[in-house]
């Protein structure tokens, strides 16, 4: 299928501080301010062994083990290891800092973190106080000569690039919120005026938290501040945030051993060509998946179409597969036995000639009830799969309808067209005054509820003028239904907020765009462009994240997809009759499947429930179902068993 108009006229989890012994963050990198760590000794009578441990620093390994034992709840084992090794998990000042934060002793926390040079006011007897109302004996005290506990205290060593002013702001903001929560408004106002405002940092945030003075109750405060209070996790969260700025040489990143294990597993997954499962690799041995677990061979071919197959889609449950193309017929198959269950021929009925009846695109609603189809005959239809009848129709376009995408409610969908007047609109399946009755029942007609046309259509202007040029080639909606992305004939990617209906971003690409998809997480956009370009883009910034090379595309519309277990793969058709598959994260080519006859492979979709199955549609008039060798053998065994019971007539695996 061609893209242009001429042919129409002829796809770091959050850390949980509090379970860790040191309460620091897994995101702290290794770039640090220098800080000696030798001498973190638990037993002065034990001289620590400093010889390398299989090439690794023994002290680092021991301290990470101490942290992990504490994380696992083996406190006695951790104490015993500290005694035997002579190493402690951390220096006393780190423990004192954590204790000060968890106890809400903000004067001590700031002094320990940033040292005597911190801009805190001294109290009358030589101590340093932020006036937080606590009366407990401080862990660190400055004497008249500027020493803390008898020695100069310059604060904890910070990570490279740490923002000292922001660290002060975070501590003082927590103090301010807790005072408000205790309904000590006067003290809170003092903190706001004398401690937060002089920092001149994050003025917008200052304005926001100052408005919290008007809260009538602690509950209202917590709600408006998006903060769970002194008795919640706020102190632990604060500790985790601040710990990212403390040198890991004295405060090991939280759950460090688990993070190292995860890193190893992730790298093994990415390096494994055929890793197609969400089960992480074992830590016991090196990892390599067998190609027998990857969809590399033919399961069956569906040959119901009489012409090129351009588009296909699995239902969200994977129980149905729909296909359509140049012949204008929409086929729906049961994927248990790959049997035809619906055949819709509404798009065959065209007065514009056989070349205009082709179906460009189709998509199942998330609840599997509806199937929307987009036609070169300047119309779209929605079929109710429960009744097998048309449920809605729109024919108020002057050019081809190219794509559609459902919102999560399964009653609303966006439609993209190459019509200058109605290029991008939001449609509803809810009842409307625009209803008609066909020979098979009531049909919702032209129920557009919003147009994204901007600027509005100007009938007096030429259709191809700069203000009127707004032709859509594909459209996608994020899984959560908050954003929409569309590609245009003039090489643009448009991103919209579906709640406000406002455009968020617009990026101009290098080549003509033919398809676009959100990843399940919504962080990536997968686009196909001419010149064989299959790219993953950051869905917020538009920056290129990864290129997938090898497929050929110069003239026709080709659609790609994310898929496989955990969406760890990208698959695309190609003009060289192949299906290309890559690792999503690395761009490494996994396979170039040959199974279609001469011509373009127009679209590929991955089974949403079974990562060992994908389908492709080609100019050879066939829908090719690919599966893993293990799955194929299972199905063959099942077919043989059914044959023995006389029940395998028409079973597709023994063609």
Image (spheres, helix red, strand yellow):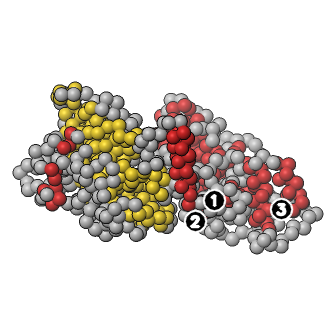
| Residue annotated with mark 2 | 271
| Residue annotated with mark 1 | 265
Q: Residues within 10 Å of mark 1 (few under 14, many from 20)?
A: some
Asked whether the viewer can see residue 335, the reply is: no
Asked whether the viewer can see residue 61, the reply is: yes
Left/right placement of residue 300 relative to residue 412 reads right
| Residue annotated with mark 3 | 87
Give the number of the mark in front: 3 or 1: 1
Upstream in sequence: badge 3 or badge 2: 3
Q: Is residue 381 above or below residue 44?
A: above
Left/right placement of residue 253 relative to residue 526 reads right
In x, y percent, where is residue 96? Answer: 75, 52
Secondary structure found at label 3 = loop
In x, y percent, where is residue 340? Answer: 35, 40
Measure the alpha-carbon separation of dots 3 and 1. 29 Å
Which residue appears at 8% of the width and 54% of the height? 461
Left/right placement of residue 38 relative to residue 405 reads right
In x, y percent, where is residue 128? Answer: 69, 53
- Decide which of 390, 55 is in the foreground and name it: 390
Measure the alpha-carbon separation of dots 3 and 2. 36 Å
Which residue appears at 53% of the width and 48% of the height? 636
Upstream in sequence: badge 1 or badge 2: 1
Which residue appears at 64% of the width and 47% of the height? 16
Q: Residues within 10 Å of mark 2 (few under 14, many from 20)?
A: some
In x, y percent, where is residue 53? Answer: 80, 69
Task: Report which quarter residue 50 is drawn in.
Answer: bottom right
């Amino acid at each position: 299928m061609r893209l242009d108009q001429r042919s129409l006229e002829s796809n770091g989890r959050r850390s949980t501080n509090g379970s860790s012994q040191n309460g620091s963050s897994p995101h702290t990198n290794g770039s640090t301010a220098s800080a000696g760590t030798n001498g973190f000794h638990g037993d002065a009578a034990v001289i620590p062994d400093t010889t390398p441990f299989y090439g690794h620093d023994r002290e680092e390994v021991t301290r990470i083990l101490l942290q992990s034992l504490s994380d696992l709840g083996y406190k006695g084992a951790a104490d015993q290891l500290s005694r035997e090794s002579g190493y402690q998990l951390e220096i006393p000042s780190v423990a004192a800092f954590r204790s000060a934060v968890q106890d809400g002793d903000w004067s001590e926390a700031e002094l320990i973190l940033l040292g005597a040079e911190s801009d805190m006011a001294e109290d009358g007897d030589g101590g340093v106080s932020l006036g937080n109302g606590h009366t407990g004996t401080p862990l660190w005290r400055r004497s008249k000569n500027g020493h803390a506990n008898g020695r100069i205290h310059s604060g904890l060593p910070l990570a490279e690039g740490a923002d000292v002013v922001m660290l002060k702001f975070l501590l003082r903001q927590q103090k301010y919120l807790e005072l408000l929560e205790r309904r000590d408004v006067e003290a809170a106002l003092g903190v706001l005026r004398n401690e937060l405002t002089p920092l001149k940092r994050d003025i917008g945030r200052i304005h926001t938290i100052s408005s919290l003075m008007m809260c009538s109750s602690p509950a209202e405060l917590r709600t408006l501040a998006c903060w769970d209070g002194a008795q919640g996790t706020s102190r632990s969260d604060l500790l985790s945030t601040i710990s990212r700025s403390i040198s890991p040489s004295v405060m090991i990143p939280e759950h460090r051993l688990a993070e190292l294990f995860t890193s190893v597993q992730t790298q093994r997954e990415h390096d494994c060509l055929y890793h197609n499962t969400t089960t992480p690799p074992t830590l016991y041995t090196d990892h390599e998946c067998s190609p027998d677990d990857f969809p590399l061979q033919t399961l069956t071919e569906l040959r119901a179409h009489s012409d090129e197959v351009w588009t296909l889609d699995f239902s969200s449950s994977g129980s149905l597969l729909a296909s359509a193309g140049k012949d204008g017929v929409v086929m729906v198959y049961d994927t248990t036995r790959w049997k035809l269950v619906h055949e819709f021929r509404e798009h065959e009925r065209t007065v514009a000639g056989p070349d205009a009846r082709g179906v460009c695109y189709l998509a199942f609603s998330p609840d599997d009830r509806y199937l929307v189809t987009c036609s070169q005959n300047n119309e779209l239809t929605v079929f109710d799969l429960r009744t097998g009848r048309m449920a809605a129709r729109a024919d108020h376009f002057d050019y081809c309808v190219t794509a559609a995408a459902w919102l999560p409610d399964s009653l609303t969908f966006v439609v993209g067209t190459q019509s200058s007047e109605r290029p991008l609109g939001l449609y509803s399946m809810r009842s409307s005054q625009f209803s008609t009755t066909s020979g098979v029942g009531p049909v919702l007609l032209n129920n557009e509820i919003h147009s994204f046309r901007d600027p509005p259509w100007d009938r007096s202007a030429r259709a191809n003028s700069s203000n009127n040029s707004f032709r859509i080639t594909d459209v996608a909606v994020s899984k959560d239904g908050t954003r929409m992305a569309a590609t245009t004939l003039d090489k643009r990617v448009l991103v919209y907020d579906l709640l406000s209906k406002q455009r968020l971003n617009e990026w101009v690409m290098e080549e003509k765009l033919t398809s676009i998809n959100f990843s399940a997480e919504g962080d990536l956009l997968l686009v196909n462009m001419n010149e064989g370009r299959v790219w993953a883009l950051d869905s917020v910034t538009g920056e290129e994240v990864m290129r997938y090379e090898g497929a050929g595309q110069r003239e026709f519309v080709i659609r790609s997809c994310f898929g496989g277990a955990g969406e760890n793969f990208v698959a695309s058709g190609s003009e060289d009759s192949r299906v290309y598959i890559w690792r999503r994260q690395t761009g490494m080519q996994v396979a170039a499947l040959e199974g279609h006859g001469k011509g373009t492979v127009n679209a590929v979709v991955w089974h949403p429930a079974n990562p060992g199955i994908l389908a492709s549609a080609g100019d050879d008039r066939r829908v090719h179902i690919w599966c893993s060798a293990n799955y194929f053998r299972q199905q063959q065994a099942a077919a043989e068993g059914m044959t023995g019971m006389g029940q395998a007539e028409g079973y597709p695996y023994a063609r």
